[in-house]
Image (spheres, coloured by chain):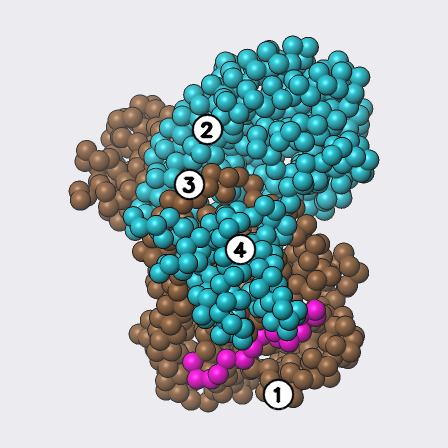
Chain colours: A brown, B cyan
Amino acid sequence: MNRSNEFTSHQSIVSGADFLHLAIDEAPSGGKSEWLTQQIRLALADGRLPVGSRLPATRVLADELGVSRGVVTEAYQRLVEDGQLAGRGRNGTIVVGAPATTAAAKPPRPARPPSPRSVFAAAPQADVFDAMRMARARIDLSPGLPDLAAFPRAAWLRAERRVLDRLAASDLGYGDPRGTPALRLAIVNWIARNRGIRADPGEVLVVAGTAQSLTLMGQVLHSDGISAVAMEDPGSLGARQHLNNCQLDTPPVAVDSEGVRVDDLRATGAAAVFLTPAHQFPMGVVLRGGRRSELTHWARESGGLIIEDDYDAEHRYDRAPVPALRSVLAENVFYAGSVSKLLAPALRIGWLLAPRKYRDALVDAKRFADLGNAALPQLVLARFMESGEMERQLRHLRRHHRRRRDAMIEAVGTHLPGATVHGTAAGLHLTVTFKAGFADTDIAAAALARDVKVHPLSWHCQRSRQPGLVLGYAASTPTNISEGVATLGAVLRQLS
Amino acid sequence: MNRSNEFTSHQSIVSGADFLHLAIDEAPSGGKSEWLTQQIRLALADGRLPVGSRLPATRVLADELGVSRGVVTEAYQRLVEDGQLAGRGRNGTIVVGAPATTAAAKPPRPARPPSPRSVFAAAPQADVFDAMRMARARIDLSPGLPDLAAFPRAAWLRAERRVLDRLAASDLGYGDPRGTPALRLAIVNWIARNRGIRADPGEVLVVAGTAQSLTLMGQVLHSDGISAVAMEDPGSLGARQHLNNCQLDTPPVAVDSEGVRVDDLRATGAAAVFLTPAHQFPMGVVLRGGRRSELTHWARESGGLIIEDDYDAEHRYDRAPVPALRSVLAENVFYAGSVSKLLAPALRIGWLLAPRKYRDALVDAKRFADLGNAALPQLVLARFMESGEMERQLRHLRRHHRRRRDAMIEAVGTHLPGATVHGTAAGLHLTVTFKAGFADTDIAAAALARDVKVHPLSWHCQRSRQPGLVLGYAASTPTNISEGVATLGAVLRQLS
């Protein structure tokens, strides 16, 4: 392999004639090279020149801009010295380095704030969330990601080759908006084996992840005259935002050590509730026993609807599986699952099983949303699920994630001695709470200033008020986990 | 290759324990084998057992059901005789035959109706459309599909291998809802080369096809207080339904031999209009010269918005390219394109460029819809576009489609001598109109009864009333085109 091949991943040859739509008139005379350097930096930052792009030859660009070749050569040289460009031989000049900031192409990572409080305390809540959610850090302990490095690339490619070998041409046309029959069958088998749900493939709607499930359900429930979906408190901020966006109120329902408080749910009068029964997000409680019976009673008695977000139920370490609520309450439960925590969020594949009454409306909503998921990834996933690859991946992730969880528990014990730890028996994150006299957003902001990103618990709270942090461990190495939590400890000592 | 490999396309090993969730209690005593045959037939029909599925061994299933092995053997044998199952050797019993009807898994193809009129004339318009749209026929001349057999499977797989080889793990997480930087750059380059549009990757929103573009725009325009989007008449029924679903009226605007009637557009008072300027759907007119200036004037003067559905502009045969309206009216035009006609609708990838004012709202709408398109297919497509594979595919399709178009023109000349032919210089379909005293739905229904599917022009009409047929040629072989049009000729002679 020659050197140029190393950079061909997203390689594109950018024509000099159109290169970045540069308007040389804007360059100060005497500062043309500086100006050009800056223009290219901006293009590197906002994604117009991704890693692997090839720049025009210096001679071509100089001609195009009407400047001397030295102007272009100097600009390229500076960026080579910055580590952002490489080459300049026969293979041309190629973008090799990720930019320090990526303003437009990816959400910007703010420069280290001199006073983190100014970012996280002064701005309104929504802006704080946006700034923080978009921030990137060297050690990212945000919840919600599996180990992405464990994605089984070779097996995925093998499955894709097989699917492409055997595909009928008609499979490449407009398909069933509910999804391909093969994947719907595979999903039914998967949730039967792993979640105790018996369903017919005809009940399955393949969707673009649980975010889409929430929006489709939100539209359909709102059209059905439902104005509120009660939410666990603490509960997922992302889910709440999706439901609110469908003009649904989300009255909070307290969560205690046994799970969602059904008396509190009754008190809201809401006709529907959003729940994470298998591993409550973010507190990690499992809903079972008496509380589960109470909830079942509520649903049967009032016809109450439950949105069951089964987001990480396959990931359990020290306890027996708990069957999905859907397995006992088929006509009350919207059951939402996805491969985001099993394979990768970037696949954007999930599934939704709905009470019979809402199925046709949901299929219509999906059809109007996008006519149905793309076919190839569905067929590849079906093969993955049916061939045993998916179970293999899950076993691998479990071993892997358990080690990382143990590293997190150990680090929390060492560095956050006053914290209470919640929800360690399953999932991809744990939550710690403090008896502290400061806001958890202050901890998160100070940690971010030290290049460690965590979710403050308060983001996921409505009424509830206990400072805490939601700490994802699955996507970080034990070393990074340990270092990240040590940083949190240092921050806490500083704030106390 | 041994025989079993021939059937592994969607092969799945269905566990006997859960097989079809059979409840043997429901079987009449003395009729267990008949009952089991029927249960399996249902599962074949509704997609629970797709072609390639492997059935449980007779011994395993018999044990599971608590019946004698002969009951299962007999049921399998009947289905082997029907041609739906094969094997029963060491490789097990495998589904090989498509079911006669596929009730749940795919929309049913109605049995040949004894009186087509009863289906297409008696039912209300919406039901007629649904029945017909879902009907399948041996020769399908519906518009809107490229030659799906020409999908470059090997090249796609090569590109995917390369992407998987070089992917960063973080690319598998939650990405930018606007799409990956690499694809947005590739799209900008593609539409610059092929559609005369100069844009920045920051302006591109990657979407799940034009259907999603329409729904996102519909939501955003409706939220902005716009109540109506005028529609070309005739114009795409599918686009109209999508806009109507967003609570937008779609007042009709006449189309004549020069394209959309701008005086008629002014008369509607609508603030926005949906157009197909490069190759009007379904009439095939190109909007240029005076009419194009008039439209530009309308947009500039009134701030009018244009949804430019550039659905098949790359496919042209006998004429020079016409730049997209977007290239001259960036702040008035929502520009929607996709790969559905270039590669395959099943990829569900398209792009939307919007006036600056609406961009943020569209990104939000996309985020709430599905958090952004799946990453892998975006990266593969980016590579495809930037490596020249996409142009190669387009050149191949042009040659291929031109031959099919010529076959269609010849067949129409031979078999439909009284018809006027429209829009042959570009696209994937042509339209014929008649001076006839009967409804075009009658022609389409009678043709469907003879296993030939076409779109009656009236489906795509609001006020306009000229009987005609919209005939897709790109997805059918010259032989089928010739036979299909001959059938239309026979039907016309019969109805005249």
Nearest to the eye among marks 1 and 3: give it: 1
Magenta span dominant secondary structure = loop
Could you tell which of marks 4 and 3 lies nearer the N-terminus? 4
Please tell me which residue is depicted at 72% across the width and 44% down the height of the picture: B246
Of all chains, the one bearing label 1 is: A
Which chain does tag 4 point to?
B
Of labels 4 and 3, the one closer to you: 4
Label 3's element? Answer: helix
The x, y position of residue A295, in whole percent, is 69, 80
Rounded to the nearest angstrom, the CA distance separating label 1 from label 2 is 62 Å
Q: Secondary structure at mark 4?
A: helix
Marked residue nearer the N-terminal end (2 or 4): 4
The chain containing the residue under callout 2 comes to: B
Q: Residue at x 68, y 58 (%)?
A: A359
Select label 2 or label 4 by which is in front: 4
What's the residue type where badge 4 is placed?
Answer: Arg
| Residue A241 tag number | none
Left/right placement of residue A421 relative to residue B234 reads left
